[in-house]
Image (cartoon, helix red, strand yellow):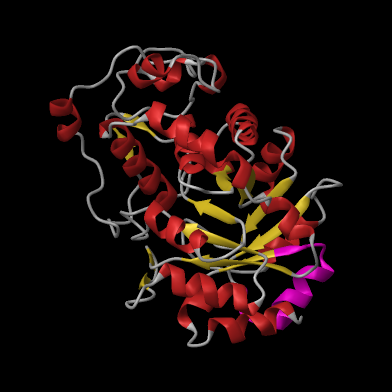
Amino acid sequence: MLNRFGASWPEMRRNPGTDTNFRRSLPETGCLSQGLPRGTACPFVVPPKRLSALKLPTSPFPPNVSDTIGSTPLIDTVPDILARIVARKRADLAQRVQPLEAWERAAERRLASRRDFRAALTAGPPAIIAEIKKASPSKGVLAHDFAPARIARAYESGGAAALSVLTDEPFFQGSLADLEAARAVVSLPVLRKDFTIEPAQILEAAAHGADAILLIAAVLSVRQLHDFREAAARYRLSALVEVHNRRELDAAIESGADLIGVNNRNLSTFEVTLETSLALAEHMPAGALAVSESGIHDAADIVRLRAAGYHAFLVGEHLMRCGDPAGALRKLVAA
């Protein structure tokens, strides 16, 4: 049976990189790729015994050192914390059984109920993407009494245009169950906030009810950004392409992205400044919907960013830490 990626599921289960549209250029955990040309699909899978011997991060709060997979370093431009997360994600994906046929059936069933994430952000400024996350690598646990459904209701009551739900478990203590629980009690579209590095994760997101996915330009090539967006569109998923600097913004533009988020958090130091969004605003392409992410705390921040051309704003930590998220959202929406 051929799937939406143009290959049979058994073939992709053996090696997701066999589809030339989605061959990955970053080093592959679980794949003996040394000596192959960059971007070549790897024909050999590392046995579990070999995988267990690899020196991969075991803690959400590892030492501040750059990661390597085997003897192959991640690309030099990937910030340290992001490199650690990607290394862990590749290791987890390599060892996990992926029920691709079941995900395909579930994704098909959910097509009719998909909610238009991008359209929700254009309905009326300022559009707030309210984020649900239990923890972060920099701040630890943000909410000990964590109830995604309750938080989602509060966000909708406060006027959020959309939700973002962290589904990464090792570093953010999130899950797809959190996304499903949040989406089930609201009418808002929901972004799966995770680290998408292979096509099967797009299918997984579609199968579990996500309405949008995040694509991080720092860890994907221009070709991957384009192809992953196209794959998402086949399931009516929006794709928010996240950038952190001018080089990544140029890559996002080259890939054809029209929904671009600027993360104000420096993923090397975890310092946050709105100047990142302000500096990149003038380089946004015409017609793109610009989203400013992180470091937004009050209406004054929204006013400043709107003046620079941003239409939507992803707010997480501020809302998770405040005692009245609905009230905090109302103040932001009124900016």
Count the labels in the image: 0
**Residues drawn in magenta:** 296-312
Q: Does the magenta stretch include residue 79?
A: no
Front position in the image: 102 or 33: 102
Q: Which residue is found at the position 27% from the left and 56% from the top?
A: 62
The picture quadrant where one finds residue 328 is: bottom right
Would residue 67 appear left or right of 106 to someone viewing this image?
left
Considering only vertical position in the picture, is 13 above or below 212? above
Furthest residue in direction right, as rendered:
286
Residue 248 in percent (x, y) is at 64, 43
Considering only vertical position in the picture, is 33 above or below 54? above
Q: Which residue is found at the position 32% from the left and 43% from the top?
A: 88
Q: Does the magenta stretch include residue 309?
A: yes
Considering only vertical position in the picture, is 81 above or below 111? below
Would residue 119 appear left or right of 193 to someone viewing this image?
right
Q: Is residue 181 visible?
A: yes
Q: Which residue is found at the position 52% from the left and 87% from the top?
A: 324
The picture quadrant where one finds residue 121 is: bottom right
Would residue 179 appear left or right of 211 to someone viewing this image?
left
Front position in the image: 149 or 317: 149
Residue 2 in percent (x, y) is at 50, 15
Residue 72 in percent (x, y) is at 34, 29
Front position in the image: 274 or 227: 227
The quarter of the rendered structure image containing the C terminus is bottom right
Q: Is residue 197 visible?
A: no
Residue 164 in percent (x, y) is at 54, 60
